[in-house]
Image: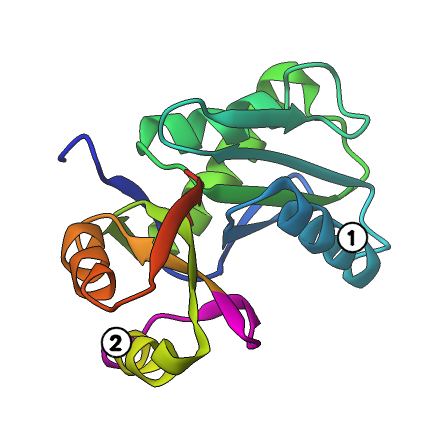
Amino acid sequence: MPSDTYKTIEAPAEGLYKEKGSKFLAFGYPVSSPEEITGILNSIRKKYHDARHHCYAYRIGIKNEISRMNDDGEPPNTAGKPIYGQILSNGLTNILIVVARYFGGTLLGRGGLVKAYKSAAADMLSNARTAVRYPERLFKIEFAYHALNEVLKILDREQLKQEDNKYDSLCSITIRINANKEKSILSKLERISSVRISAEDDKII
């Protein structure tokens, strides 16, 4: 896979593993920020409030990755770590995996827990579709009002979503551009008089 791309899952997916009465429900999500992850975790905890544990792991980024593992009360390194191991072994990023455990009354031991959380995450990934994506960068476009129609035509033609905008005597629009289309799109915008473009960050989604 080219160095300027990354692999993630295309859409949310689910998996299941059962062992000695315990059920391990696995949920995978494509994500792009810790804030997004917080919202998903709160939703899972609310929906599956009767589960004894809500363990998870995530990884975000293609260069300076942000990652975290959480055992949520299970013995250390028996839940979050094996979940995260599945993320690494499949070469994925921008992904969150949550496993909700319903206790079946029989203790599984450390080895049993590691196997269960790993298997639940693996089952979810076997049901998920993966995709190779290009990173996107955030750009701010500033221009005089008379150039608004020209700018909007290009954004519409390239199907670029506006994240923020201000239409005044001096207009500004913030957009994300796919890395493999960046040069071409910026070149078109720069041909318009009064347009100034600045890169805002290097986030990927």
**Would you place residue 20 above or below residue 181 in this image?**
above
Residue 117 horizontal/vertical position (percent): 57, 33
Q: Is residue 22 at all visible to an observer of this figure?
A: no
For the N terminus, which image quadrant? top left
Given residues 203 and 23, the one toward you in this image is 203
Residue 183 horizontal/vertical position (percent): 16, 51
Q: Magenta stretch containing residue 164, yes or no?
A: yes
Q: Residues within 10 Å of mark 1 (few under 14, many from 20)?
A: few
**Would you place residue 52 above or below residue 27 in this image?**
above
Q: Secondary structure at mark 1?
A: helix
Identify the residue at image location x=23%, y=40%: 5
Identify the residue at image location x=64%, y=46%: 37
Which stretch is magenta? Answer: 157-172
Given residues 162 and 147, the one toward you in this image is 147
Q: Is residue 168 left or right of residue 203?
A: right
Given residues 104 and 149, the one toward you in this image is 149
Q: Which residue is mark 1?
A: 42
Alpha-carbon span between mark 2 and mark 1 = 39 Å
**Quadrant in which residue 128 is drawn:** bottom left
Q: Secondary structure at mark 2?
A: helix
Q: Which residue is mark 2?
A: 154
**Quadrant in which residue 20 is drawn:** top right
Residue type for callout 1: Asn
Residue type for callout 2: Ile
Identify the residue at image location x=48%, y=37%: 119
Q: Residues within 10 Å of mark 2 (few under 14, many from 20)?
A: some
